[in-house]
Amino acid sequence: MDLDSMDCASTIDVTDDEEIHQDRHSYASVSKHHSNNSNANAAPGLLPTTTSVHELLECPVCTNSMYPPIHQCHNGHTLCSTCKNRVHNRCPTCRQELGDIRCLALEKVAESLELPCKYMSLGCPEIFPYYSKLKHETVCNFRPYNCPYAGSECSVMGDIPFLVAHLRDDHKVDMHSGCTFNHRYVKSNPREVENATWMLTVFHCFGQYFCLHFEAFQLGMAPVYMAFLRFMGDETEARNYNYSLEVGGYGRKLIWEGTPRSVRDSHRKVRDSHDGLIIQRNMALFFSGGDRKELKLRVTGRIWKEQQQSGEGGGGACIPNLS
């Protein structure tokens, strides 16, 4: 969909075998505020010999840590099970046939190791047994976030400050301060917007960042519009906030209230779970008025902290942050 064809008026109230390489330990897009030198943060008690053994457990093909089954050739060169298939059963070091030899000694050595999380340079202080480390890293709170922009397949990763700057500078996303919003979405031909992401706006309030999405897609056989909010942080923090969305016209309105989803959940996952304000196209055109050939939707909403809403009865809970 051509994003330039839509106007949005916004009012803010405040394989060669030797050449196969894949380094999972590199995060070039992570904010420059983080040091990439993990040695400077090495945990006490981790001896140099541990580092040497850890290097032995690094697959020479993909450079990832090896987990059972660890394979070796007749000359003792090792590699991981994934790369064994990629190199067509030939040792990438000596070119001898690999066969099905397991390196049981190295697997046993790995059981005795305790290693820091690979996100140590991003702030994770945890140390794990070798075979538990991988499981932790899949859910580590210090792991980088994926770019929340849904208008393209963006592969950039980083911490929240880095991604906010990335959204502003690279995706040209609108940035606003405040916890209330009033958007007007206009489209001259609303029948051409199936499966199209229309708008992403970032709001800064309560010292946090939130992403407001508005888009169109097919829900079964019915074309719908959907608006939802995502929190730029982890799920546990997202639960501290609530938001409301409202759309209407001509004496009718739809209201949605919910908790913003973390950007740990992908845009598609949130959309496909229908966790947001969903408007059938016929209803959206009714709200637009006129001859119903042009979409003119005004979506208003606000964000508040749960304890403020309950403690203050909803009055004065949202104080714009203009910093």
Image (cartoon, helix red, strand yellow):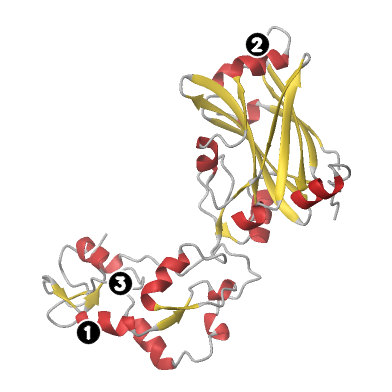
Mark 2 lies on a secondary structure that is: loop
Q: Which residue is label 1 attached to?
A: 105
Earlier in the chain: of badge 1 and badge 2, it is: 1
CB within 8 Å, label 1 to label 2: no
Cα separation, mark 3 vs mark 2, equals 59 Å
x, y percentage for residue 193? 56, 24
Q: Which residue is label 2 attached to?
A: 293
Residue drawn at (70%, 53%) of the image: 240
Residue drawn at (54%, 64%) of the image: 143
- Location of the N terminus by quadrant is top right
Q: Which residue is label 3 attached to?
A: 67
Whether residue 164 is situated above or below residue 292 in the rendered picture: below
| Of marks 3 and 2, the one in the foreground | 3
Residue drawn at (51%, 19%) of the image: 222
Whether residue 303 is situated above or below residue 81 in the rendered picture: above
Earlier in the chain: of badge 3 and badge 2, it is: 3
x, y percentage for residue 135? 42, 66
Cα separation, mark 1 vs mark 2, equals 72 Å
